[in-house]
Every structure is written in C-alpha cells, then in structure tokens.
Image (cartoon, coloured by chain):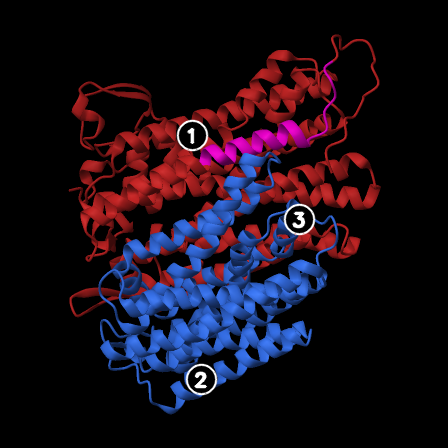
Amino acid sequence: MIDPVIASRLQFAVTTIVHIIFPVMSMGLAPFLIYFTWKEIRTGAQVYEQLRTFWTKIFAISFVVGTVTGIVLEFEFGTNFAAFATAAGELFGGPLALEGMMAFMLEATFLGIFVFGRDRVSDRLYMLSSVLVGLGTWLSAVWILVANSWMQTPRGYEVATESGQPIISLVDPIAAYANPRFPWMYVHMQNAAVLSVALFLTGVAAYFVWTNRDTEFWRTTMKVGLAVLLVTAPFQAIHGDAYGRHVADTQPQKFAAMEAQYETDSGAGLKLIAIPTSLSDITDPHADDLFVIEIPFVASLLASGGDPGATITGLDDIDAESPPVAIVFWAFRAMVGLGTWFILLAFWGGYRWYQGTLFDDDLLAKAFMGSSVLGIFTVELGWIVTEVGRQPWVIQGVMKTHAGVSSSLSGSEALATLVGFVGVYTALLVLYWYVVIRLIRTEAPTRSPTPKRETNVPEEVVPSDD
Amino acid sequence: MTDISIVATPALANGPLFGLPLEELWFALVFAVFGTFLFLDGFDFGVGALFATRTTDGEREQLLASIGPFWDGNEVWLVVFGGMLFAVFPSVYATLFSRHYLLMFAILGALIIRGLAPEMYEQRHDEDWQRWWGRAFIVGSIVSPFFLGVFVGNWLFGVEGVASIASLLAGLAVVALTIVDGAAFLGLKTRGDVRLETRSLGHLAQVVYLLLAVATLVVGSRSSPHVELLSVPTLGLLGLTVLLAGVHVVAGWAGRYYLAFAAVAGQVYGLVALAATLLFPLIDPATGLTVADAIVSPLSLNIMTIGSSILLPLIATYFIVLYSSFSGPVEEGESYT
C-alpha cells in the first residue's frame, strides 16, 4: 500500500494546484469588476453594464468553485497533517480563522448582493458591494499568505516539547505575522492574479476580434485588459527580481535549487539550461553530471542585486536535505520565460494600439489567444517554485513535511481520498472550463461575422439572454 | 514594529484578557458558530431536499432563487468554525479530523456536489441536463447534513470507528432538522401551493426530528458515560426543543411564518447547546481531552478574542444588509442567475 506521507503530500499538491486557479480568477477579476461597475454607474453606458454583467457571471462561478475547493484545503490540515496542525495550530490556525471572519464573510455576503441584487439595491449600495467583494478577496489573500509566509520565514515563535510532540507557541505576534516574506509574496501574488486575468480578458477578446465578431464589448475588454497588462507584466519582472534576492537571503537552499547550484561559488553563472544526462538525475537532487549552458556571473548578480562576484551558497554546503532540484529549477525557468513573453506581448499590443491597428494584427490576436490561460499556468509554476523549493520543510528549519502528517492515517485511507480527488477535481476542472466557454459563447454580446473589415459595417449587437 | 510588540505582548501573554473565563467562552463560541452554520446552511440543505418534491420548472426555479444570494455566505460559517477550532483548540481539530478521515472527505465531497449543482443546473435549459443536476442538488443537500450529523454524533459520543448506531441516528436527526429548517424558510420566501405543501412536509419532518433526537440520545447514552440523560440541562434542553417544536407547528398553522422560523432557529441552537453541555468539561471524549487541556496559550487566545469581538459584530451587519436586501418572497420570474 502507498505510504500515507506520500499520498497526503500528493493530495495536498493536487488540491492546492486546482484550488488556486479560482482565487486567481476572482482576485484578478475583482478590480476589473469594480471599474466596470463604477463606469456603469457614472456614465450609464450600455457597454459597461454588459461588461459588468458578463464578467460577474464568470466571477460568480469561479467564486463558487473556489469556495468548495477552499474548504477542502482548510480541512486537510486536520485530516492529513494532524501532527503539523497540533504543533503549529497556535500560529497557523489564527490567520485561517481571521481569514474566514475578516475576508471570506465579507466576500460571500456582498457577493450575494453583487450577483443577484442589481435591481434590488441602490446604486450606492451596489457600488459598495462591488468594492467590498473585491476587498474581501484581497484580504483573503492577506491572511492566507500571512500563514504561508510564516512557514517560509518563521519568526516570533518558541518550540517546546510536550509529551514527545513539538509544540510551537506564539511569543511575538507582530514578528510572526508581519514576517519578512509576507510583503514579497503578497505583492507578487496579487499582481500575478491581475496579470493573469488581464491575459485572459485580452485572449478571449482577441478571439472575437480575430473571427470578426467583435463588438464594442470585446474591443473595450481588449483595451482594458491590455492597459492593465502593460502595467502588471513589467512590474512583475522588476518586483520578481527583487523577490529573488530576498529568497537568496532568507532561504538559500531554495535559491540554490532554483539555480541548480550545488557548489558554493562566487561569480556564479546563471544556468539557462541544465539537462540531466541520465534518467536518475531527474529526481536526484544531487545530480552533478548535468549538461549545462550558463551565462557567467549572472546568478551572483541576481542574488546580490548587482555584484557579479557575490557568493552563492551551494546545496552541498547547506546542512539539510535539498528540495527536488529539477522541479524547482525548471518551474522557475518556465515561470521567468513566460513572464518575459508577457512583457513582450504587452509591448507588442501597446505598440499596435499606439499605431491605431490593435484590432487588425492577426498574428497579435493569435498570440493573445494562445496566452489567455498562460498567466494562470505561470502562477502554478511560481507556487511550485515556492512550495517545492522549501522542501523538505513544512516550516522552514523547524518541522519537516513528513513529520507533519497524521500518525493515525493509513495508506489505504490516504490512497482512497487521493484517487477520489484526482477523479473529482478532474471532473470539476472540465465542468468549470465547459461553463466558462459556454458563458463566453452564449452570454457575451457578439455580432455575426462580417466578411470584410474595411467596409464600415455598423455594429449589430446581439443582445444576450437577460 | 518590535517596539509595539515589546509593549503589547507581555500584557496579552500574562493571562486571559480582563480575567475573563476565556476557555469556557471560546468553547461556547465555537459551538455557537457551528450552530449558526447549521441553522443558516441548514435551510439551504432543507430547500435542496424539498426540491425533490417540486416538479414544475417554475417552482424549482423559485426554490433555487430563494437561497441563491444567501447560501455561499451561510456556508462560510463552516469555514469560520473550522478556522476557530484550528486556532483555539488545535489538538482537537487535528485529532478529530484525522480520526474521522473518510467521514470528513465524505462531508467535503457532498458539499462540493451541493454547492456546484445549482450553478450547473442554471447553465443549460435542456431536460436531461437539468434532471441530472437537479438530482445532484437533492442528493448533495441530503447527504451533506447526514454526514455532518454523523460527525457531530461521533464527536459527542466519542466514537473511534467509522460510525456507531447513535451517530447514524444523529445523522438522520440532522437531516430531519434541516428539512424543518428549509420548510420554515420557504414559508417566508414563497406563496401559494409551494408554501402550503412544504409547510406540511416541514411539520411531518418536525415529528420525525423529535423522535430521532430522543432515540439518538437514548442510544448514545448507553455507550457513553458522559452523556447523562437524566440531568437538568439535558432534560431542560429537550423540554425546550419539544416546546419550540409545538410553537413551530402552531405558528405555521396560524400563518405566522416568522415566528415559526424563529422556533426552528431555537431548536437548532438548542441541539448544539445540548451537545456542548453534554461534552463539557470534555472537548474530545474519545481521547479524554478537556477544554482546559486543549486550549491554546493566553497570547494567541487573547489575540483571537480581540479579533473576534471586532469582526463578529461586523459580520452580523453584513448578514443584516444581505438578508434585508432580499427580504420578502421570491418574486415572479426571479431566477437563480
């Protein structure tokens, strides 16, 4: 039978990887919805009402799936990681409880008004609801990331042993909750969410532009998405670069894994490619017979913020087990690569917009279409770097992941739920995708395709069902 | 930043805030939050079960519209309950959830189906699609409270295995209670036939609930010494439940639906209060853990106390705004989306 530790870790990986898609959608859409609502109320323009109505539907389904998959995560700390929950509950449970009360309640109640109440409440209360829903989603991330960042850079605690079990108690709440990692994570995550949704918006809009079925609705969607992309894509890179330096300082073994750096080295090169030369190298964290192409000095440069001769501590000199280097290394490279692509895409779109030919470049439209879900994919990669990169620790330097798993859990129980989740969550993703595509096809205002773009055909807006 | 903590931390770490009996208060609060979840999401479950008795499109839409704006907020009380238990009684949260491993995932699975089904139901208007998602909604709405009831039964009676007769009876009792709850809620949100027919079903479920609740206690008390049947609080709360059940039925007949709904709320809180009184001073009979053993250190507890005292009144305001924005019966043609 499968080891309950492995099954629990896999199950947590599956359930978080699926769950994060939905908060990214709701956190990323929130600012757009606030903007559309505000424009609708201020200008009374039909296009903003359509934008608000349509994207609220996508938001609502994302929120529902996010709720049901989110409860699973909260419960899994108790079911699968009971030893961790018992040891760290005092520090870790608090933020979760506060998240529920401060953030989730705010979102879930005002979402009722925001989704169902346009005709029932005043403009003022409706506008307020959109802001409070958005605030709720963003506050939610505050508490979840307070809890997560504490595990990355734990502060303000004391460890004692009570009847053979470690008990971690809170001694300095401000040090613990305002820990050094939190602001880095929060900014990186929230910007990533907005960036991902901006890519989604422009991607979907580009599809309607490309098929000549675009209306003012889709043109506005594309412009708003692109405008946000132009800000968030470059910002993510600049911020991410500084974040990398912070990781090098606080979690050197994670940074070394990101760079596949085994030996402590000054003037370390940035490895563009490190290809395992045998099959076992893929999983072996200490594989050193890699085929490497590197840019000299750049890794040192990145870690120190400008000093090409700076020393990077290698994994061999870190007195702990290493994370699975291959996963971290490749996820990091793919994330940075895609991030760079988003910047290029934003500038390309921005240039066409400046030229006044944003809706005429077919190749650009295809590039946007192809990138529509890449933002969310990149968020997944970033989380893989963060979470796999801190292994074997569940709380950095304090508790190892395997020690956190419930002792009462049997392999067969863990396997049963793991298999169940793989099945249920696959179905859930398929359904979500189906519903989103269906909403886009049936609920958004489009027009019948016109054969020629040059002829100035007046837009025939096909009204949506409601 | 450390300056603040140097000043604030010792004051908060020395003992309970203002010398309050925080252990007992938090024990009560955790159960009160669970009760709020059971009352509010309970009527969502009940409406889902009663959905099975509605056959026309219009009536089914009416039922979905009645809970549409509310259910998500209602379910967040479960998240808050989980978070509070984790934050304040971490060892209970951990041992209880891992001991009933498969049951917890059964609850989660049922909640996923229940939450997703109405969203899916509304996506397409063809018959097959709506028949299947309608069934999923009904099943999810019955199975969720059943498993939740079994969980509470296992907790209260200190069951070590998957379930016992008493905890299965508790599951059935909770299903009956949610149907009572859902019917009382529909008394406020619907008119005409739907209202009258669901009212009769609610009254029937009320009788079933009383029988099941007593059966659960009698069976449970035989294997669990801490479940004292013949004690003042147990008999008092049972008596109160019977009284409120009478009020519910009579008020329903008299057309006083708000009073009927309030009487159901009283029964839900009464049930949770009964579970809490039977447990106290234990918090996990299976391991013999007491409230005093399981509680976190004063510093964490004080922070949670301050946080909750600010946030819970705010949450109450959100719910008042939400429920008053959608007060009164579901209007003709109002649908779930």
Q: Mark 1 belongs to which amino acid?
A: Met
Residue A322: mark in rendering: none
On the same chain, marks 2 and 1? The answer is no
Between discs 1 and 3, the one toward the N terminus? 3
Which tint is chain B?
blue
Q: Estimate the x, y position of residue B32 in percent, counting from the top left.
A: 47, 74
Label 2 or label 3, whichever lies nearer to me, is: 2
- Quadrant in which the C terminus of chain B is drawn: top right
User: x and y percent of residue B129 in the render?
Assistant: 54, 36
Q: Chain of mark 3?
A: A
User: What amino acid is found at the position of numbered circle 3 in the picture?
Assistant: Val
Q: Is residue B164 above or below residue B224?
A: above
Circle nearer the viewer, 1 or 3: 3
Query: Which of the labelled discs sits on residue A335, or is there none?
Result: 1
Magenta range is A429-449
* Front-lying residue, B200 or B149: B200
Residue under the point 66% across and 23% down:
A350
Q: Chain of mark 2?
A: B
Please say whether residue A442 is one of the residues in the magenta stretch: yes
Q: Which residue is label 3 attached to?
A: A115
**Residue A252 visible in the shown view:** no
Classify residue B85 as left or right of residue A50. Answer: left
